[in-house]
Amino acid sequence: MVSQTLTAANKYDNPDTLFVARDGTGEFRNIDDAIEVCRAFMDYHKVIFVKKGIYKEKLIIPSWLTNIEICGEDAEQTVITWDDHANIRTQERPKGMGTFRTYTLKIEGSDITLKNITIENNSARLGQAVALHTEGDRLVFVNCRFLGHQDTVYTGVGGSRQLFRNCYIEGTTDFIFGPGTAWFEDCEIRSKANSYITAASTPKDQPYGYVFNRCRLTADEGIDKVYLGRPWRDYGYTLFMNCDLGSHIRPEGWHHWQKNREQTARYLECGNTGTGADTTGRVGWSRQLDKKEAKKITMEEVLGHIK
């Protein structure tokens, strides 16, 4: 005979909001505990509201979770933080843990939204250290902050789509990288070192990689030699359009990483302003879109119906 306990419905199997508060005033003290009680493959929208606080958690939103929104009380004061980096050595991994295990937050599920929250990797600058690692499709980030050094944001799966709207992303080297398709709208992209902003590895058959629209490219004091990107793999795609490019952007704009990649890299610009937008010194293998070409590249064209 099956016990009533086993057959009882999950009391959290409903669209009600879950509340997380580090100070103990919410239903949960940890975000992971709230994620754990969510039902697999939900067909309704479930909000996890996270009150102000520092949440030292290494989180995974697994592939069987969908339609979850994690909403912080305040973007600057609601912080998820961890401090792994690629060169941490353990008995199990004597050569280091590697880039792809260093995430603070890994999102495997699809149809996930984050709002008003900070995701931080605050490790020492001792190697690659991912703050956000995405694998799911149709992911949306609104008014979020992504803090780190090298490899801050990793869009980890080709064909997956992400929208970053009104976000702040900072880093040193290749701090937005990977094969995913992502649209960045009204974001601030801040360089903390003389290095490279993007490292796209867009698959050959994928029409779009990274599109930055109406973004502001800024830099810490003293930073004055930054490339817009370099292709991590052949056919890397990155477009900056209608962006304000600061004086820290190098005149040549782009780097080939390996010389053969300049033959396939899809590096594009259109309608940018600011000191760094002067194209007279750009590398010959990047391209300026004309207005007719740029008009066809819309958020809906690149991402579908993500909003």
Image (cartoon, helix red, strand yellow):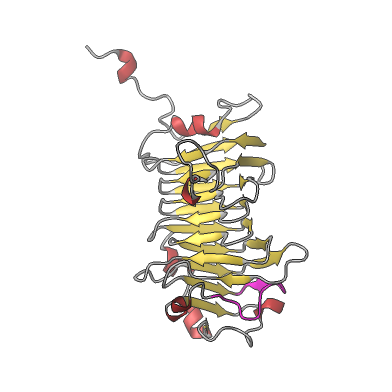
Residue 22, quarter of the rendered image: top right
Whole-percent x and y of residue 45? Answer: 44, 41
Magenta highlight on residue 243: yes
Q: Is residue 272 above or below residue 208?
A: below
Q: Can residue 81 be spotted in the picture?
A: yes
Taking depth in this image into account, of 53 and 153 the one nearest to the observer is: 153
Magenta highlight on residue 116: no
Q: Which residues are magenta?
A: 242-255
Taking depth in this image into account, of 268 and 101 the one nearest to the observer is: 101
In this image, 252 relative to 36: left or right? right
Magenta region's main secondary structure?
A: loop
Q: Is residue 117 above or below residue 185?
A: above
Q: Residue at x 39, y 71 (%)?
A: 207
- The quadrant of the rendering that contains the N terminus is top left
Q: Can residue 73 be spotted in the picture?
A: no
Q: Is residue 281 above or below residue 7?
A: below
In this image, 284 relative to 235: left or right? right
Residue 303, quarter of the rendered image: bottom left
Q: Residue at x 43, y 59 (%)?
A: 161
Whole-percent x and y of residue 81? Answer: 61, 41
Whole-percent x and y of residue 190? Answer: 67, 61
